[in-house]
Image (cartoon, rainbow, N blue to C red):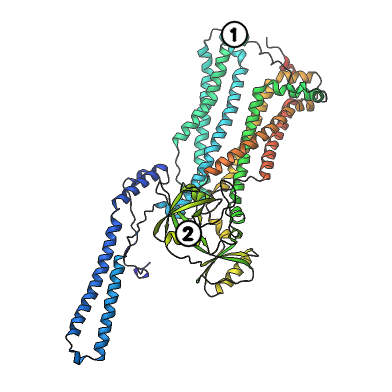
Amino acid sequence: MPNGAFSQKEYAAIAVQFKNSNHYAAGTDAYNDQVDRQKASLKATLSKRPRDRQKQLQASAQAKLDKQSDKLKQQEKQLAKVPSGYQTTQTKAAKQELTAGKKKIAASEVQIKQIAKPTYMYNDRSTNPGYQDYFDESHSIAAIAIIFPGFFLFIAILITFSTISRMVEKNRREIGLMRALGYTKREIAMKYIVYTLLAGILGAGLGGVLGMLTLPQFVFSLLSNNNLTEFVGVIPWSYLAQTMVAGLIATLGSALIVLTINLREVPTNLMRERAPKAGKRILLERIKPLWSHLSFNQKVSYRNLFRYKGRMIMTIVGIAGCTGLILTGFGIQDSVNDLVPTQYEDVQHFQALVTVEKATQQVHADNIAAQKPVMVKSITARPTHGTANDTVTLMVPKTTTNFAKYVTLKSVATSKRLHLTNKGVILSEKLATDMHAKAGSSVNLQIGGKKVTAKVTGVTTNYAGHWLYTTQAYYKKLTGNSVQTTTRLVKTTHTKKAQREKLSRQLLKEKGVLNVSFPRYAASSLSTGGLGSVVLIMIVMSGALALVVLYNLTNINISERMRELATIKVLGFYDREVTAYVARENVIFTIAGIVVGWGIGLFLHQFIMVKAQTGSILFPMTIHYPGFIWSAVITGCFSLFIGILTHFKLKHIDMLDALSAGE
């Protein structure tokens, strides 16, 4: 813009670049700590600047006043030279102007002495909304990254451990033969150690690199806007190292444990088939009326459930983990989608904000049901410790009567209604968290350049934006100024887009109406951390992991019980009965896993949504019932798919090979 567009003569801001700031990645904790330290140092260096600037302003104003005073003195001298008998009407008028000028100078001198010290604000990049929103979104994604990779790794380790253990266990006879031929334990173990090392390094390395090269760019494309469009890929080697260590623990660790157990046995025991696990009476058998009504196949299935406790626990944990992750994904989606509706239905019940020129003015339109005069003002809140400030919307109603019809103030701690009093202010929940404030404590505010300390009488539930509510009397006590209620909280009878546009046109035609806004429908700009866009990835990946878990564990189950299944086929069981014999156990495991998974999902959802709170956003902790249904259905469909594959595999069991003696 041209200089002529600015009325002020002095520069109002200074852009500062700190030394060595390019050594830190923007947005990281190290960068923020460095900036905070430099800001504190700069503030200390310029601590005397407000007083010096005040003296400059006073001296400049006094210099101008002195020139005016000198002119008046000269006029006075000239008037004094005029004899009293020769004074004219002009002379008398000049004397009157001289007297008025002296009074004006005296008043100006008082004003110069009252010139306040200027307020210097030290803001960093985070005050740029577009810049900060991107990092807020990144932190929200990081909240998901705390949980999902950990659970994926845990379940992957669980499945890998089972697979490697089964592989070593299956080669017991070969290990025993090699022991009998004179191979040392170390030589025998090296075969499995090398195999598992290669599997762990190649699997974790390849998966880690591919994931880092693809997923971050995809997530960035979901978060990018007109200001941020260029993706700069970085491979965090520390994460890759952690992944490889986890992979080696799963592969190499499981091989070493099973090898250690097997290599302790003598070769003759190793070359024999391990005896099947003996069946035991279960608790259900002691409930005679129930047990007697079960069929033979059901009794066998229930016995087998508790016969292989390790596999039962592993299957339930694997399915529960996957179901929990899927439910968490749906829960995140629900919380993101419910943010705006919950804020403007459960907390703030007005539909429009209308700004008027005069505090006494009422607005009129066809579909206005009610209106409440308030003062709405943007202020700054400063924490007692730290340098980060929050921009807060201060709302002061003309009267507290019926204010609850427009804004619900409900205590976070007790869920009871809060009431505005002349003893302090009520803070929104996220603001109270940022300011480390609670009922009974104080909060530092800057209102119109004046720094004040307000007492907190309550913390109210709120989901979007930083809000502070108080009464006219307490506002005047804080600032010494009267409240100008030039904003109207408006409740309308219709809220469709066409009706909102019509209302805006009607109101803006009205004399004295300066602005009309609909906060709920402008809330699409709220930064929700891009969580909704990433949820689909998590659900798909969790579902794929559930498929792998079920297939792997079912495959291990069949391979371990091949002789048992071949035996019941020889005894005359049809293919469908053999499948039901195995599938019945998987159905029970799946149902148990889904129920446990729902509990895991509830915990993970709450943990992630708390971590995802950024800026002025506080997500509602909601998971709608379709999330529970879909997480169960997805897991159930995968279980059904695995059951179909299992059926065809069981049909082709070679009974002669399975039952032939190894000796």
x and y, in percent, of residue 528 in the image: 54, 50
Q: Nearer the viewer, residue 303 or 503?
A: 503
Judged from the image, the secondary structure of the residue bearing numbered disc 2 is helix
Nearest the camera: 627 or 584? 627
* Residue type at tag 1: Pro
Residue 84 as seen in the image, left or right of residue 450: left
Q: With respect to residue 653, does 122 lie above or below? A: below
Nearer to us of marks 2 and 1 is: 2
Residue at numbered disc 1:
267
Q: Is residue 205 left or right of residue 643?
A: left
The answer to whether residue 123 is left or right of residue 183 is left
Does residue 24 sit above or below 291 in this rendering? below
Identify the residue at image location x=56%, y=22%. 254
Which residue occupies 53% across, 75% down?
A: 511
> Distance from label 2 to label 1 (Cα)?
88 Å
Examine the rendering and report whether any part of residue 654 can be seen: no
Q: Tell me the number on the disc at residue 474.
A: 2
Q: Is residue 459 visible?
A: yes
